[in-house]
Image (cartoon, helix red, strand yellow):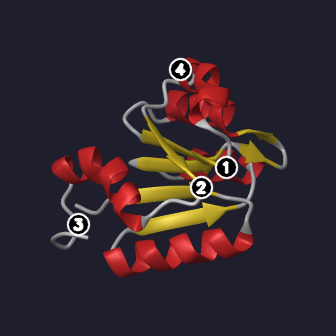
Amino acid sequence: MEIRVLLVEDDAPLRRSLEKYFERAGYAFDSCSNACDALKLAAHSHYDVVIAEYLLPDANGASMLKMLTLMMPKATPILISEYDLLAIADDLVEANVRSFLMKPFDPVDLESALSPVLAVFPVNGSL
């Protein structure tokens, strides 16, 4: 079984970099740059992981993750941001986000955030 990832990142260079990472690692993924498109994608597909930027052009990423996890309760939400964890901690708790990556982050940090999902659905061996 393959892991399906939804990536919501408005920074085009970072989004492309993460897309290349997911492609090389063997993930099935969709990506977009805003919350509206993410909600449309989630209405038509199931995702095991949703990775979202905190500050999207049309929404707070934590609030969007909360909506997406209501649509897909088993999806693992991961929030990424240039903001310090303490500055957005209340939003993370309210959205039930357990994984946070502060930009810039290393691929090893991303692998660690994905590890609970990988334990259930191994992807083509290790990352």
Give x and y (percent) for residue 67: 61, 30
To which quarter of the image does residue 28 belong? bottom left
Q: Residue at x 37, y 35 (%)?
A: 74
Q: How many marks?
A: 4
Q: Is residue 79 above or below residue 20?
A: above
Give x and y (percent) for residue 60: 74, 36
Pointer 3 or 4: first along the chain: 4
What crowding class fits label 2: few (fewer than 14 Cα within 10 Å), some (14-19), or many (20 or more)?
few
Residue ID for mark 1: 82
Q: Is residue 104 above or below residue 38?
A: below
How far apart in space, not on screen, are marks 1 and 4 (Cα)? 18 Å
How far apart in space, not on screen, are marks 1 and 3 (Cα)? 28 Å
Q: Disc 1 vs disc 4: which is toward the camera?
A: 1
How far apart in space, not on screen, are marks 3 and 2 (Cα)? 25 Å
Q: Residue at x 50, y 59 (%)?
A: 105
Q: Secondary structure at mark 4?
A: helix
Q: For this view, does 89 lie left or right of residue 83?
A: left
How far apart in space, not on screen, are marks 3 and 4 (Cα)? 29 Å
Task: Tell me the quadrant of the picture where the C terminus can be found.
Answer: bottom left
The amino acid type found where label 2 is placed reads Lys
Asked whether disc 1 touches disc 2, contact meaning CB atoms under 8 Å apart, the reply is yes
Q: Is residue 104 above or below residue 87?
A: below
Residue ID for mark 2: 103
The amino acid type found where label 1 is placed reads Glu
Residue ID for mark 4: 93
Q: Secondary structure at mark 3?
A: loop
Q: Secondary structure at mark 1?
A: loop
Q: Residue at x 65, y 29 (%)?
A: 88
Pointer 4 or 2: first along the chain: 4
Q: Disc 3 vs disc 2: which is toward the camera?
A: 2
